[in-house]
Amino acid sequence: MVRVRFAPSPTGYLHIGSARTALFNWLYARHNKGAFILRIEDTDKERSKPEFLEEILASLKWLFMTWDGELTFQSQRFDIYKKYADMLVEKGLAYLEGPAIIFKVEKSKKVAFEDMIRGRVEFSTDDIKDQVLMKSDGTPTYNFACVVDDHEMQITHVIRGDDHISNTPKQVMLYEALGLGLPKFAHIPMILSKDGGRMSKRHGATSIFEYKNMGFLPEALVNYLSLMGWAPGNDVEILPIEEIVKLFDVKDVNKTGAIFDMDKLSWINGQYIKNMEINALTDKVEVFLKDRNIIQDNFDRMKLIEIIKIYKERMRILEDFIGAYRIFFSDELEYDEKAVEKHLKKPNSKEIINRCKSAIEADAKFDKVSIEEAYRKLADELKIKAAELIHPTRVAISGKTVGAGLFDMMELLGREKVLKRLAKFC
């Protein structure tokens, strides 16, 4: 049975690169009906923090990555690592240097392994120095603990970032020295920024929960991360998780680095928002707005649903709904100064707004159909394009030049609010 593992260190939050590594492991396990094991590499006692671990676990759960079995903590296994290190000393393959135990690297040898993505990879032992197994403080080194744990946890496939590829020959030597069978290795190319360099915070290398706080949906983030270095073919970009699980194979991952594109992620997220059933989307928007104290428990859900209906086609992240919601419920709008200057400070702007007010006041129904008819009729009377009425009205009632359909917005705002906002510019 396929057994893979994700092994985070609780010395920081879960970031995009690590989340993708976890996802590729999880997808490979689920595709092969295998096990996804979580190992916590917490040997750095000073930097390992419970709050980091909590955030990592919560992030994985939020991204639907459930793990199998109990968590394994390296900090609870020091006696096991010591036992294996002593075995190498007894075999004459390692030596003591004070309380530290060091593996002796035989020179002028080739160390090779088959990588599921890269093919055959070969290193010379002349480029590898003797390896510390157990430090003088009794803690194991990364490479040694990794080998022992992967063996004891019966890991069949080690899928990790290609920044670890230089560690693999060191681990291969330890497997062979201990007489253990090798797992299969797959080294995933790094995620790169748009300019081809390493990811930084300004390129989007933030913690997973920052994406949650911005209003990205977990389904969309999983969809996007799965496409970073892998593709299902036929230029398909929107895939439910179940479909990704069916199609994913780590052998199909690209050999070159994947480019992180925030615009593409936002577009994919917008597709999920647009296609989500209205009540499910309203539930998500409600939680998002409540968490930010934009709405309280006694809010008007039906009004929120109507707002979401007219805006969902345009929204990319849940945070976008904050501005939309405020248009309908805030008494103080934030006006785009350039939009006001362009559309509401022309020589004839006051006359235009006054004529729009009069048309609205005379509208008996005040629904989107009758409002549009009134505006088209007024444009014909004034011998101007309808846009010359629509743009200033939009800015006056919303403060923005873009948004939902103007007549939908006006109906939802109601006659009284629309007239009050137009009156500010008469």
Image (cartoon, grey):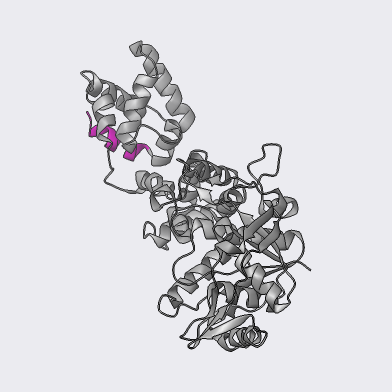
Q: Nearer the viewer, residue 295 or 173?
A: 173
Relative placement, left or right, of 120 versus 330 is right
Q: How many marks?
A: 0
Q: Main secondary structure of the magenta part?
A: helix
Relative placement, left or right, of 252 versus 50 is right
Up the image or down, 273 lies above or below 404; here it is below
Q: Residue at x 59, y 87 (%)?
A: 82
Residue that sits furthest to the front in the current view:
108
Up the image or down, 300 lies above or below 104; here it is above
| Residue 106 seen in the figure | yes
Residue that sits furthest to the right in the current view:
1
Q: Nearer the viewer, residue 60 or 414?
A: 60
Q: Which quadrant does the N terminus fall into? A: bottom right
Residue 331 drawn at (x, y percent): 28, 47
Relative placement, left or right, of 123 versus 403 is right
Q: Residue at x 46, y 53 (%)?
A: 215
Q: Nearer the viewer, residue 260 or 238?
A: 260
Q: Is residue 418 magenta?
A: yes
Tell me which segment is drawn in magenta: 415-426
Q: Is residue 70 magenta?
A: no
Residue 8 drawn at (x, y percent): 54, 69
Up the image or down, 377 lies above or below 397; here it is above
Residue 125 drawn at (x, y percent): 61, 64
Q: Which quadrant does the C terminus fall into? A: top left
Q: Residue at x 52, y 39 (%)?
A: 313
* Residue 299 quadrant: bottom left
| Residue 365 seen in the figure | no
